[in-house]
Amino acid sequence: MGDGFAETRVYIDDFESFEYLNEKKYLYVNIEWDDETQMGTVTPIDGASDSSEFTFEIESVIIYRNNGDGTHSKQTIKQTRDGVPLVNFNVLEGPLLLSI
């Protein structure tokens, strides 16, 4: 990954049963962030899984930047470009557009 791009994966199941094995009840997504477009995307990794019982919320996005002069900056974003709090935005239904 180059500067301005980040990627991670998130896996969630009920941590009690073995329904993730037999009934594929889990949420497994890839999260990508592109600093140039200020857009984050959440993409299911296993489209055959049943994630209907799980909620996936992002409370905030924290961006650490190398300022190029030996210092770093940190920025916390808690809402979309349209002013919607991130916890109220369903990241599984569309791209996450942020304003910095």
Image (cartoon, rainbow, N blue to C red):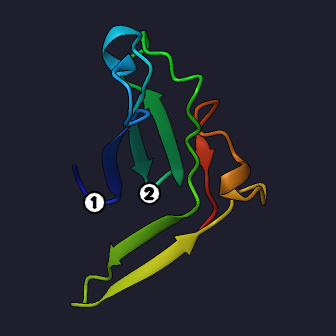
Task: Name the image quarter holding residue 99.
Answer: bottom right
Q: Is label 1 in a helix, a strand or a loop?
A: loop
Rendered view: 31 above or below 72: above
- Looking at the image, which residue sits at the far front? 16
4 relative position to 36: left or right: left
Is residue 67 left or right of 94 when viewed as pictured?
left
Q: Please name the residue shown 33% across and 21% down the image.
A: 18
The mark found on residue 35 in the picture is: 2
54 relative to 36, above or below: above
Does 13 sit left or right of 50 as displayed?
left
10 Å crowding of disc 2: few (<14), some (14-19), many (20+): some
In the image, what residue occupies the spot 55% across and 33% down?
Answer: 54
78 is higher (above) or lower (below) than 81: below
Say few, some or many: other residues with alpha carbon within 10 Å of mark 1 (under 14 / 14 to 19 / 20 or more). Answer: few
Residues 48 and 66: in front is: 48
Q: For mark 1, what is the residue?
A: 3
